[in-house]
Image (cartoon, rainbow, N blue to C red):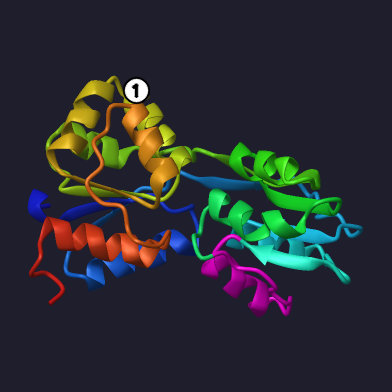
Amino acid sequence: MPRETTVAVFRPDDERLDEAAELIESLGATPVADAMLAVEPTDATPRTDADLVVLTSKTGVELAAKAGWDPGDATVAAIGESTAEALREADYAVDVVPEEYTSAGLVDALAEDVAGKRVEVARSDHGSDVLTDGLDEAGAYVHETILYRLVRPDGSGASAELAAEGDLAAAAFTSSLTVAHFVEAAAEGGLREQAIEGLNDGVVGVIGPPTAETAADYGIDVDVIPDRADFEELACDVVEEVAPTYHE
């Protein structure tokens, strides 16, 4: 495939990966769909005795809803609009969505109202300490429930091989874990240095500042961070950076 058009996406190995590839294609680029995340449910459910419940992903919402979780009178907060949309689709009310769709943004939105309250944080096993530590420092009694684990799927790493060969024009990372799993897959193939060099020769987009920090830790240069932590904005910005005329 021509290098000039190839954009790697790393969504979970479900419909989100297919949707990501379709979006990249609709923007005029060539998607490389390389699942760097797979979901392993823990069968845990959010607590039902909290004053405030925080959900941080669509996956967490879907697992909670499937288990029949009922928030009762608790205030429900979502980390961003995609999580809020999933809550609404599952017939849950959404009381808080921060302006900045990050853990730090959630802390900013909630800090003034959580002192002395029981706060349930329901998420994956790779959630940021920024959220739980921030709420704790604001005076909340914080409990965390791990709804699912995120692992690297078998067979991932095609994008790392393309990057090492100089055949990847861009990559769109949606979390720190996708960066770590990309590097892990490259290392397993003996291609770590070459893959990172290949990324740095192209365009690297990340969903937000925490992911940018992780990329920098691995020696990956970040070119694109969207104004909002939203995959569609990330994809559009990356494709625009790669080939400005593709989706005009």
Name the quadrant of the C terminus.
Answer: bottom left
Q: Residue furthest front?
A: 112
Q: Is residue 126 visible?
A: no
Label 1 crowd (10 A; few <14 / some 14-19 / many >=20): some
Residues 62 and 13: in front is 62
Q: Is residue 138 above or below residue 186?
A: below
Label 1's element? Answer: helix
Q: Which residues are magenta?
A: 79-98
Point 59% across, 55% down: residue: 108
Q: Whole-percent x and y of residue 56?
A: 62, 56
Point 42% across, 33% down: residue: 180
Q: Whole-percent x and y of residue 98?
A: 57, 64
Point 83% across, 67% down: residue: 74
Residue 90 shown in magenta: yes
**What residue would you read off at disc 1?**
187
What type is the residue that disc 1 sits on?
Ala
Residue 88 shown in magenta: yes
Q: Quadrant of residue 42?
A: top right
Q: Whole-percent x and y of residue 72?
A: 88, 70
**Direction from residue 63 to residue 31 in the image, left or right:** left
Residues 156 and 115: in front is 115
Q: Residue furthest top?
A: 190
- Total marks shown come to 1
Q: Is residue 72 visible?
A: yes
Q: Is residue 154 above or below residue 235?
A: above
Q: Whole-percent x and y of residue 8?
A: 28, 50
**Direction from residue 68 to residue 165 in the image, left or right:** left
Q: Residue furthest right?
A: 49
